[in-house]
Image: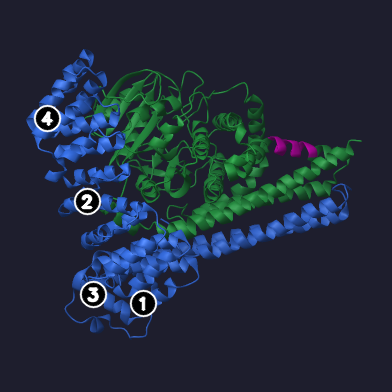
Amino acid sequence: MWRTPLTIYQYLLLIYFSGLNILYGLFCCVGLRAIVVIFAREFSQGTLRDLLERDVYKPVSILVPAYNEEVSIVASVRSLLALQFPEFEVIVVSDGSTDDTLGQLYDAFALAEQPLATRQDLPTATVNRTYRSLSHPNLVVVDKENGGKADSLNAGLNLARYPLFAGVDADSLLDGEAILRATRLFVEDETLIAVGGTIRPLNGAVVKDGRVTEVAMPKKWLERFQILEYAHAFFTGRAGWSHFKSLLIISGAFGLFRRTAVLEAGGFLVGTVSEDMELVVRLHKHFVRKGQPYNIRFTPDPICWSEVPSDLGTLRRQRNRWHRGLWETLWTHKDMLFNPRYGRLGMVAVPYFWFFEALAPLVEVSGYILVVLGMLFGFISPRFAVLFVLLAVLYGMLLSQMAAGIETFLSTRYPRLRDRMLLFLAAFLEFLGYRQFLAFERSVATVQAPFKKGKWGKMNRTGISGTNSRTPPPDAERNLPPDDRASDHKSPAGV
Amino acid sequence: MWRRYGDAAYTLVTLAIFGFETLALGALSLSFLLGKWAGVTSTPIEGVLLATVVSAASALAMVGLYLLSYQFVSKLRDRRHAGQLDTWTERWIGLALADDSAESIAGSPRSRRLPRAAVHAVLSLLEAVKGEEGDRLKAVLARHGVDRWLLRHVASGHLTARLDAIESLGKARLPQSLDSLLVLLEHPKPVVRRMAVRAAAGTVAIMPPEPGPDGPGGKFIQALKTADLKAGVVQESLLLLETKAGAVLRDLLADPDLPDSLLWVVLETVGRLGLADMAEDISRYAKHEDPELRAATFRALHRLGTVPDHLQRTLLAALNDEVDFVRIQAAHAAAFLPAEVALPALEPRLGDDSWWARRAAAASLARLGDDGVSTVKRAAQTHPDQAAREMAVQILLEANLLDPATARLAKGVA
């Protein structure tokens, strides 16, 4: 009696497995062609320099929401102020920080209190004070009541002077040319409203004067697994979706937006844990409904370096939050699912995120259970089970390697042959517990999603040291957020 | 930023793997379906599964081997290339600065093909070196057939080869390549059109001016008018024309059938290039029915730092335009009106509905000398509109005309 439904479920699982792997493979091919073959050739160093010399750029406001970021805020702001870009302002919004975030900024950048004429385009929590740096006139610091990351970004947007703005996490470092490379796309395409860059793990890298000068493989396997995940997510997934004009995520760690477009769509949504994805989905929705041509792109070159969790607890909380965020966004915009009004977004991209991202952990966990039960009760032969698991592992490794392969073409790749071997090994080892651990946590998040709406989670951070991120400062983990609201703002690394 | 060799081969590898694995997964799914719900224990399905496992393992081995080899080879190659590049750059600099003819200095047989590093080095130099020195280097390129080789690749069906060749021609700025580049403005791939128009503009910039439709500027204009390019790309290309831009922009403005989108680009470019002698040419668009063009005209005049006398009345009227972005640009441009005309017109704009118009008005007032600054200071204290007072304070602070303590006081008063 139970054999028929089980067989049907097996069949569905196999179709799911095949479909997912074919899609990933397709994205890998598309991503590779779009990134390496075309993009790398169009935006050479010479072209960029030519255009910069002729003032072909749009000025940018860089918004840095910060909550209890005393460990990394100064290094991060220093790296932003050192960007190679002719006209930009940095607006740090301290979101009711209870640690010494403001004090660190005050001392490092000679802040002086200055009342600023603020537009009230978006409602936010009360702004207590605004400061301007006496040493860097393009640095503005806002001290406001706690209202969450989205609220901080909205407060920054109210102050932003320039037509483009970038949201950058306070624990992230941008490549020197990141803003230049991203903004030039806006000059070229007047319909472009948002651009997402590539996020690469900072762990293991050598940082000097706020710049990543050398990349090296981190020591912990947990961090190495995440290198593969990020390569997969950015170099194939986002590049692929962008190619098909259906990009639904721009990472909160670094994204560049046209200010007027975001204001028109209502700014960042307060009370969600995935304000970055939610905004992008809302932008799509807004412009499709309006019938106005628009474009949202991923571009591989502006690289943002961001610290990834180095302990299981932080990783678990982060992935739990990301997955709940995914559900929150999908649920908020559930009317887009299979809605032909939204074209390929409604018919392909949104369903993909529902079935291959949001539901994936449940399918994966149920698959593990089914294989074990099948072997126990004899409806799956052990040989078949072993072969099938082996196939899943091989495909996983293959896709990881294909994505990490794209990174090999970057000048800032992991330099040693040994690193490449380690990444190869990591692609295998991640199936020995890491993947299952994440699948389980994401399944838990799926169940929690309706009850923990908008809740973040405590994050441990080692901090961006002034000289080398391999050697965190001894007091790096003190003064963690007192409540359960984290300051870790990166978006889902999932495709 | 990116290594540009081995990527095409890697693309082929991934495409092959993708195609093969799609077939394998399709076969697996199909065999399962054809098993008529016999379950996965049936022997034929296991056979297909085993074959799929073997194919996936082979693919993984292939990718792994490729990447390891690439990492190893590229490391060696990068190191060697850097060394060769230095050597060749020194040789080319010597050649460019030498008095002897290129033929005698190059010192290599006519037919010999230059090494890749030599070509890269000379192309990089050509980006910076112009005039006689540049011509010497170009003569070497021609002597070794590099120009013909690049032109052949520009017409190649292989995308990467074509893009690389366009980029090289953009650096080399060879007059003989202009026609080939302009043809590419009709190419179906946007990336080819974008790169070609930039390269063509750079080439026109170094060619001697020749009036008429058959001159480089004329040909460029004709190609630009029919090409499917976004406004930003057209603007980039016009800016890359350097000293030839003025003539091209004038020719474009002289065309009565110029589409509005192109006209907008021309107005923007005039402003960005600071072609003050064209202020008169563009001023007639200040009354255009399209608000985007009106705003672009005022923005250009603001950048040029001049407002023709006959345009004063139009500009004053534009300060009350119903479209906010026209008011904003007009307020910026008003800084270049005589103070006695601008002051009474700008002061009411401090209370504009638009935050940006208030800001532009305050900034312009602050640039109008002592009277303007006094007006802003007065507004900071006494303007009936709180938003106007705040904006006035803001502008004074930014211009270092007010210290923060007084500003706080002013805000308190407000």
Chain with colour green in the figure: A
Q: Is residue A206 left or right of residue A373?
A: left
Q: What amino acid type is highlighted by mark number 3? A: Asp
* Residue B87 in the image, given as x and y percentages of width and height: 30, 70
Discs 2/4, front: 2
Q: Which mark, by number, is residue B282? A: 2
The figure's colour scheme reads: by chain
- Chain letter for mark 3: B
- Check disc 1 and report its element: helix, strand or loop: helix
- Discs 2 and 4 share one subunit: yes
The magenta span reads A362-370
Q: Colour of chain B?
A: blue
- Check disc 2 and report its element: helix, strand or loop: helix
Q: Which residue is mark 4?
A: B372
Inter-mark Cα distance, 1 to 4: 61 Å
The quadrant holding residue B234 is bottom left
